[in-house]
Amino acid sequence: MDRSSDRSTEPASRPPYVAHVLHVSVQPKTWFGKLIVATVGLAVMLIAFLLSVIVFAVIVSLIIVAVIYVMWVVHKTRRAKLRDAIDIDSKELGR
């Protein structure tokens, strides 16, 4: 049996889907628009670069502070051990 004749007698349940597309162009068309886009792009790149320099400076500063603190603790510990060694030697000699 031919099924094409069955389809023609069936009523359409809904119309076919029609997509409504709104196209917005963001490409500048004039020289002024291109100038604005270039200026904004340059400003964004400059801000990103400055923020990365600031983050780098903060990280380097934290590392320097940590190294100075460790050196200070080691120096303090060595002086205390040296002082204790001198005290022990002077007690042994009877001074």
Image (cartoon, rainbow, N blue to C red):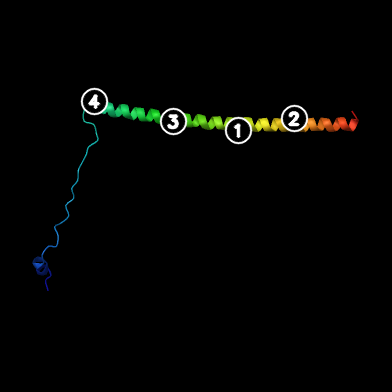
Mark 1 / mark 4, whichever is N-terminal: 4
Q: Position of residue 44 (x, y in %)?
A: 36, 30
Mark 3 closeness class: few <14, some 14–19, many ≥20 residues within 10 Å: few
User: Which kind of residue does numbered mark 2 sit on?
Assistant: Arg
Q: In whole angstroms, how far apart are the C-alphas of marks 1 and 4?
A: 51 Å
| Residue that badge 3 annotates | 51
Q: Residue 48 carries which label?
A: none
Q: Identify the mark at residue 79; answer none if there is no mark.
A: 2
The amino acid pointed to by label 3 is: Leu
From the image, state whether disc 1 or disc 4 is nearer to you: 1
| First in sequence: mark 1 vs mark 2 | 1
Residue found 45% across the figure and 31% down from its top: 52
Mark pair 3, 4: CA separation? 29 Å
Q: Which quarter of the rendered picture does the C terminus lie within? A: top right
Q: Measuring from the top left, give residue 35's x and y in whole percent.
A: 27, 26
Q: Mark 3 to mark 1: distance in Å?
A: 23 Å
> What's the CA distance linking mark 3 and mark 2?
42 Å
